[in-house]
Each structure stands twice: as structure tokens, then as C-alpha cells.
Image: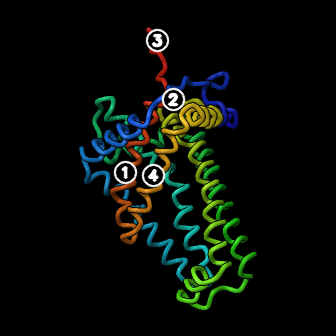
């Protein structure tokens, strides 16, 4: 029964929430609403999201040794695959604010009492697996091009990447493979976590709804993906510090994008 609840939610079968067709203007409107949520009580949100720059700095420090240098870029870029999981608390804050409920940073932790928590955990585990697979693929690609001998230093590694044909092959192929991973994650979770937080439909219905929303709105979802990617790059440049602002805005905006993409259920009278 627990497994079924994770996959199909609390109902007797798998739900299929209705999807709207939206435009690019709706994407930017969701971003505007996300900014409004962040701007309402920014001290709360920045406090919550300090984990992003801290985690980024830790990852960079941990991988700065010669043995881990080839994984520095895959770790930094792949960390974004887990962003939808870490933003769950922000979805809850936006949900409460939308309903006119009392909102503080503590309410971000109300997710632990969500009836859909098993499904949320299951979907988060799926993203973790994708993150690990991405790292394994990136490492295998590096070994195939350069062998299993680690670079002697940071400068040697940099020269190896930008000064050799193998290095440019690694850049091109690695980014192409990373793009595939990013598209898979975007398509499967663009509305999955907000949907689970809003309605206990189960992981299968959440992923299926997210994929249908993507297929019905390929251009708006692609624009959203570019906004997220660009925001993460901008936020990461000043030693990841900018993520303390970029991530909460994107997190709140994700909730509003979900509201635009997925039709709310009719209220029974």
C-alpha cells in the first residue's frame, strides 16, 4: 500500500490533471510573481536559501584537489539537477501566500507534514539517481579522452581542456550530454513537485503531468529552462553567492508557472 501511495497517490487510481496552453508572456509573468514573493519578505527567503551558496562553495572546495578536478564542472552544473528538490519549501511559501495564509520562513518546513511526502521523497530519489548517473557519465567521458591519470595541477588541467583537441571534444560532447540530462529533468519535474505539494496525486501522475505540460507547451517550457540555466550561471559567477537570490526567485516562480500550466481541480459544493 505504501508503494502504491508513492506511485499513485491517495486516490484509487492515477489522476490526469488537465493542462493549459500558455505563451512565453506567461513565463515572464510567473517570473514577475516569483520576484514579488521573494520581495515580500526577503530576509526569510535569503536565510532559507543560504544553503545554495554554501553547498556550492563546499562542492568547489571538495573537488579542487587534482584527483577531483575533472568532476568540478559536472558537480557544479549537475547540482542544478537537485534544485527542484531543495526549492520545495519555497513552493510551500508561495502556496500559503497565494491563499492569503500567514507566511514566515518556518512554514517552508511544513512540507514534512504533506500527505504527498512519500511521493516527494520518491521523486527526489529519482533526481538523485540522475545526478549520480550524470557524474558517472562525465567521469567516463573524461577517462575515455584523457585516460585515468588525474591532472597534475589546476593550471595543467586548464591547459589540458582548452589547449588540446581532446579538451574541446570533452567540452562539446560533455555539454551535449549534459543538455540531454537537463532536458529530461526539465520535462519530468517542471510542475511535478508543486503538483505533489498541492495535490497528492502520486509520483507517476506528477511526472506524467509534467511531461504532458512540456509537450503541450514546448516553447514556453524551453524559455523557462533557458531562464533557469542563465540564472544559475549568473548566480554562480560570484563564488555561488548570487544563488542566495537567484534560487528563491526561481523557486517561487516555479510555483506560479505550475499554476499557469495545470488546471486547478473544481471545488465540490
Q: CA distance from mark 3 to mark 1?
A: 33 Å
Residue 228: give its label: 4
In this rendering, position of residue 51 left or right of residue 42: right
Mark 4, Cα crowd under 10 Å, few <14 / some 14-19 / many 20+, is some
Q: CA distance from mark 2 to mark 4?
A: 25 Å
Counting residues from the start of the chain, the first of labels 2 and 4 encountered is 2
Q: Secondary structure at mark 4?
A: helix
- Residue 142 location, quadrant: bottom right
Mark 1, Cα crowd under 10 Å, few <14 / some 14-19 / many 20+, is many
Residue appearing at x 55%, y 83% in the figure: 158
Residue 30, x across and y down, in percent: 37, 38
Q: CA distance from mark 4 to mark 3?
A: 36 Å
Residue 199: give its label: 2
Q: Which residue is mark 3?
A: 268
In the image, which is nearer the foreground, mark 2 or mark 4?
Answer: 4
In the image, which is nearer the foreground, mark 3 or mark 1?
Answer: 1
Amino acid at each position: 500500500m505504501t508503494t502504491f501511495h508513492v506511485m499513485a497517490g491517495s486516490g484509487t487510481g492515477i489522476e490526469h490533471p488537465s493542462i493549459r496552453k500558455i505563451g512565453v508572456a506567461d513565463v515572464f509573468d510567473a517570473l514577475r510573481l516569483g520576484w514579488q514573493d521573494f520581495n515580500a519578505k526577503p530576509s526569510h527567503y535569503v536565510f532559507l536559501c543560504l544553503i545554495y551558496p554554501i553547498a556550492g562553495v563546499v562542492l568547489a572546495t571538495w573537488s579542487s584537489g587534482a584527483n577531483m578536478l575533472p568532476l568540478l564542472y559536472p558537480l557544479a552544473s549537475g547540482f542544478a539537477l537537485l534544485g527542484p528538490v531543495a526549492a520545495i519549501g519555497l513552493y510551500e511559501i508561495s502556496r500559503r501566500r497565494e491563499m492569503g495564509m500567514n507566511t514566515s520562513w518556518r512554514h517552508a518546513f511544513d512540507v514534512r507534514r504533506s500527505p504527498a511526502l512519500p511521493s516527494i521523497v520518491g521523486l527526489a530519489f529519482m533526481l538523485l539517481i540522475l545526478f549520480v548517473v550524470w557524474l558517472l557519465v562525465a567521469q567516463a567521458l573524461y577517462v575515455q579522452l584523457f585516460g585515468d591519470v588525474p591532472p597534475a595541477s589546476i593550471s595543467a588541467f586548464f591547459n589540458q581542456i582548452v589547449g588540446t583537441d581532446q579538451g574541446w571534444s570533452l567540452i562539446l560532447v560533455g555539454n551535449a550530454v549534459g543538455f540531454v540530462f537537463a532536458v529530461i529533468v526539465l520535462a519530468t519535474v517542471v510542475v511535478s513537485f508543486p503538483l505533489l505539494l498541492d495535490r497528492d496525486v502520486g509520483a507517476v501522475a506528477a511526472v506524467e503531468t509534467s511531461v504532458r505540460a512540456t509537450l503541450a507547451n514546448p516553447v514556453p517550457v524551453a524559455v523557462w529552462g533557458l531562464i533557469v540555466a542563465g540564472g544559475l550561471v549568473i548566480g554562480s559567477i560570484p563564488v555561488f553567492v548570487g544563488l542566495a537570490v537567484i534560487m528563491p526567485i526561481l523557486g517561487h516562480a516555479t510555483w506560479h508557472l505550475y499554476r499557469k500550466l495545470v488546471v486547478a481541480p473544481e471545488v465540490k459544493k
